[in-house]
Amino acid sequence: MKILVIAAMLLAAGAGLNSQAPAFAPNGAASRNGNSIDAARELYASARYDEALALLNGLGASGGSSPAERRLIEQYRSLCLLALGRADEAGAAIAAVVRVDPFYQPSEAEASPRVRATFADVRQRLLPDLASARYVEAKQAYDRKSYAEASVRFRELVALLDDPQMGGRLSDLRMLAAGFVELATSAAAPPPVKEKEVETAPPPSPVEPKKSAAPKIYTAEDEGIVPPVIIHQDVPQIPSAIVGMTKDKGVLDLVIDEQGRVINIALRSRVHPMYDSVLMAAAREWKYKPAQLNGTPVKYRKLLQISIKR
């Protein structure tokens, strides 16, 4: 009944205001289909919804349109379908818009509150599946060593997963994507450019003041050493997406300073490329009561075994 009321209102508005723009305003897409889209818009404004829909269906079936044009076509299709009382098909048209551009949301200037609400409901339902599909595409780019492309795709995926309409869903996937952003960006970085060597006479070596020896880094083997005591050492869980793909154990080499901070981390035995980056990021935040020698805090090297529970 509500759909019929909406359709009747749209019909009345279209009959009285033939020049008025529809709920979605064109976003400037210009191509060989531009005139046809404009014609469909005029038919819609004249309340000739069946004719506008037939023209839009033909444009969509012809293919070859840009993503912006396809989105615009589906926007007008959804309006025509709503005006004709075909709510299910209108939802499918909105879904097509979201699949073309998951980041797109109509503004107040582009759509009525009712259309925006319908759009938001469809988008919220589709986002998890779209995010999962985007992860697959980004991972494929990474696997074929297209690191620059993978970096861009994973950054877009993180932005999509942070969208308020995701509501915190797929948190494990968000952790994986963030790790791949770091890996892909690092792999895509160009090697440092070597400066051209110029043969010149070496300058005389300055006389440097005598440096004091660096503080010793103690280990459990040193006599009289009291090892550091854990204050905060939370080991992150394995993301569900890579469960079963990890090694059973890993080993971290930590250097803890006189304030109990982790100042150096090295992986002696890896678990999984994605989990390793998450583990090292967590280790930088760990805190200890520093090791002591004769009551004095000292630097300490600690080997920590990470056991993976399956």
Image (cartoon, grey):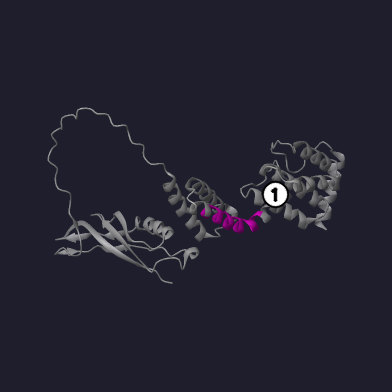
- Please tell me whether mark 1 sits on a helix, a strand or a loop: helix
Residue lying at the far bottom in this picture: please name it. 310
Q: Which residues are magenta?
A: 123-139
* Dominant secondary-structure state across the stretch colored magenta: helix
Residue shown at 54% from the left, 51% from the top? 157
The C terminus: image quadrant: bottom left
Q: Amino acid at mark 1?
A: Arg
Residue 28 drawn above or below residue 253: above
Instruction: Please state if 25 lies on the left or on the right of 259 as rendered.
Output: right
Residue shown at 77% from the left, 42% from the top? 22
Image quadrant where residue 284 sits: bottom left
Answer whether residue 134 is magenta in the image. Answer: yes
Q: Which residue is mark 1?
A: 116
Give whichever of 259, 217 is nearer the camera: 217
Answer whether residue 162 is magenta in the image. Answer: no
Q: Position of residue 153 (x, y in %)?
A: 53, 49
Residue lying at the far top in this picture: please name it. 200
Q: Is residue 295 visible?
A: yes
Image quadrant where residue 31 sits: top right
Q: Position of residue 18 (x, y in %)?
A: 84, 38
